[in-house]
Image: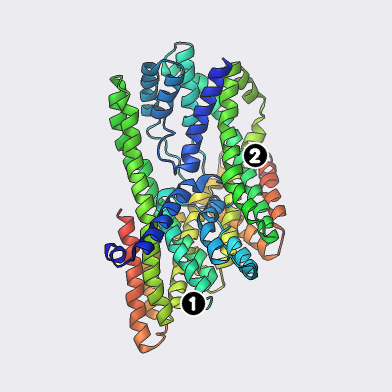
């Protein structure tokens, strides 16, 4: 990456620095509209929006701009600090796609996001919420118990420095790496092959998230002898979350309006809970 | 009391904005917010002490994924204020603060559902070409509603006393709380379904099930599955028909490069 920046003209370097700042701020602000349904979807859109506005600024590109905005409204969830890398990478992909629409399939952009968000969240959460937090606050608590105001200040500084560094350099690294590899890939016509492989990773990650992040269970019991959830756990664990996901998928296939599905999620949730079927 | 309630309400907004605007950089932690509360109420030392003991209590609680963990952030702000205002210990103040944290949590569920409907409004506005408004749902309205989610319970608790909030919490029926909790679990299933609708085909569905069953049966984390997935993708690459002689070998080299990048980051 150091070589990359060395070969740049001052103007290019300035543009890259501006982009990196934007990646940093917009990755940090990714949770401002966190919602149950698609989590950080609008957050990611907010991050990529300056790029989309720049690429599709002409009035005749309006339909392309709408499609690009819709594309980034898909489910997304990642630790803000590590998400910056994804934002950088996806920015380079969007630039490539706008330059030459035949170079890559736009659906593959979401496949890249899906395959990266899982592992990067795992690493990001354990690093920032685990390691860094414990380190910063065990030092901070110690000082605070002796009545020193340095305690909270030190804890804040130790938390903020790695948080900022990973967000800033992660975004820049994602962008420059994307620029470099996408050129090689689109040049050799290998894009479809790589995207197929990325799709495999993305789908497996989504499968793992369905099994670990939904957690709907059933309280149905018959006497003390039969506990449905226990039986399910032994033959088909996480069957209920899978069934719910495919029910939603089926409704989307049948072109049921998203408003109706949303109503079903909230109203149905209350009803099923009152009836004692799911919890 | 109005001024104090207002100022502590503002501290609760700062704590909320840490996770909304600053990537959850730990400014919301009890040690920091309790010190701020101490500063506002003119007793920094007590704020530090209460903050240190609340931080110790909550050290193990980590907020990860879709589940809303016990809201220690809101709890510690109120607890510190009460510990200072009524001159009690941190632990005693925390028991008083728990109903308020519960109230905040319920508001949180409602706000996170409201955000889902904002997301649908955003989609409609994209079709109308109102791009500025689309972004404002995120950066303006998201921020406002999340701030209110903390400000309202904090202000009520400090201005009217905890009794009022406890009474409100008692009025909320269990079936509604449980029902909303179930709804908040069903909504991510919808999110995943939306994601699948752009990526899934008959041919690739097998990979989704593979990832699902690995985690369901073996309890392997998403990160673990992602590592298997990258390895599997490399194996599949070996079996895919080569595009052309030169390209085929380059494909192997490139995808290896990609996975190397992922691995480097995972070690970070």
| Residue labelled with disc 2 | B179
Using the rendered image of the protein, determine whether residue B174 is visible from the camera's viewpoint. yes
Secondary structure under badge 2?
Answer: helix
**Quick one: label 2, few (<14), some, or many (20+) residues within 10 Å?**
many
Look at the picture and state if B128 lies above or below B202. Answer: above
Q: Residue at x 43, y 57 (%)?
A: A19
Which residue is outermost to the front? A10
Q: Residue at x 49, y 28 (%)?
A: B11
Which of the pair A139/A199 is nearer the observer?
A139
Which color mode does the image show?
A: rainbow
Quarter of the N terminus of chain B within the rendering = top right
Look at the picture and state if A258 lies above or below B166. Answer: below
Which residue is outermost to the top? B87
Rendered location of residue A34, percent (x, y): 55, 46
Q: CA distance from mark 1 to mark 2?
A: 47 Å
A233 to the left or right of A12: right
Which of the pair B255/A91 is nearer the observer?
A91
| Residue labelled with disc 1 | A103
Look at the picture and state if A145 lies above or below B227. Answer: above
Q: Which mark is residue B144?
A: none
A131 to the left or right of B77: left
**Quick one: label 1, few (<14), some, or many (20+) residues within 10 Å?**
many
Q: Residue at x 46, y 50 (%)?
A: A27
Q: Nearer the viewer, mark 1 or mark 2?
A: 1
Mark 2 chain? B
Which of the pair B230/B44 is nearer the observer?
B44
Rendered location of residue A124, percent (x, y): 38, 49
Which of the pair A19/A228 is nearer the observer?
A19
Using the rendered image of the protein, determine whether residue A36 is visible from the camera's viewpoint. no
């Amino acid at each position: 990456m150091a070589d990359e920046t060395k070969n740049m003209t001052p103007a290019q370097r300035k543009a890259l620095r501006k982009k990196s700042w934007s990646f940093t701020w917009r990755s940090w602000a990714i949770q401002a509209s966190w919602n149950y349904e698609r989590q950080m979807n609008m957050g990611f859109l907010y991050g990529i929006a300056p790029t989309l506005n720049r690429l599709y600024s002409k009035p005749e590109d309006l339909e392309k701009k709408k499609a690009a905005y819709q594309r980034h409204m898909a489910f997304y969830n990642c630790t803000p600090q590590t998400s910056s890398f994804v934002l950088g990478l996806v920015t380079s992909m969007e630039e490539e796609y706008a330059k030459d629409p035949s170079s890559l399939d736009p659906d593959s952009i979401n496949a890249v996001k899906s395959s990266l968000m899982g592992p990067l969240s795992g690493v990001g959460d354990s690093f920032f919420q685990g390691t860094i937090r414990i380190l910063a606050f065990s030092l901070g608590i110690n000082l605070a118990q002796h009545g020193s105001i340095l305690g909270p200040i030190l804890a804040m500084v130790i938390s903020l420095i790695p948080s900022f560094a990973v967000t800033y350099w992660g975004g820049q690294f994602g962008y420059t790496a994307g620029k470099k590899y996408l050129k090689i890939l689109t040049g050799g016509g290998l894009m479809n092959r790589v995207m197929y492989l990325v799709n495999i990773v993305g789908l497996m990650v989504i499968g793992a998230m369905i099994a670990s992040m939904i957690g709907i269970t059933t309280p149905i019991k018959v006497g003390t002898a039969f506990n449905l959830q226990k039986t399910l756990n032994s033959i088909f664990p996480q069957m209920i979350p899978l069934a719910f996901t495919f029910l939603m998928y089926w409704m989307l296939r049948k072109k049921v309006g998203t408003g109706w599905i949303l109503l079903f999620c909230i109203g149905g949730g209350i009803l099923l809970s009152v009836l004692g079927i799911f919890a | 009391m109005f001024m104090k309630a207002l100022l502590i309400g503002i501290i609760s907004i700062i704590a909320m904005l840490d996770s909304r605007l600053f990537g959850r950089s730990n400014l919301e932690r009890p040690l920091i917010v309790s010190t701020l509360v101490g500063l506002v109420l003119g007793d920094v030392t007590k704020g530090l002490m209460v903050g240190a003991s609340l931080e110790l209590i909550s050290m193990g609680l980590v907020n990860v994924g879709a589940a809303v963990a016990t809201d220690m952030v809101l709890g510690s702000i109120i607890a510190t204020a009460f510990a200072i205002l009524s001159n009690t210990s941190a632990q005693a103040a925390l028991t008083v603060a728990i109903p308020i944290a519960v109230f905040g949590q319920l508001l949180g569920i409602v706000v996170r559902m409201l955000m889902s409907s904002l997301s649908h409004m955003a989609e409609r506005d994209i079709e109308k070409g109102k791009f500025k408004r689309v972004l404002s749902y995120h950066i303006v309205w998201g921020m406002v509603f999340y701030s209110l989610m903390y400000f309202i319970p904090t202000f009520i608790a400090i201005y009217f006393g905890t009794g009022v909030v406890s009474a409100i919490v008692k009025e909320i029926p269990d079936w509604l709380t449980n029902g909303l909790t179930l709804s908040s679990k069903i909504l991510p299933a919808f999110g995943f379904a939306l994601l699948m609708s752009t990526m899934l085909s008959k041919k690739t569905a097998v990979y989704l099930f593979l990832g699902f069953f690995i985690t369901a049966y073996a309890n392997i984390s998403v990160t673990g599955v992602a590592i298997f997935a990258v390895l599997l993708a490399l194996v599949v690459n070996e079996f895919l028909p080569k595009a052309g002689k030169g390209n085929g070998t380059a494909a192997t080299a490139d995808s290896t490069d990609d996975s190397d990048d992922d691995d480097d980051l995972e070690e970070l």
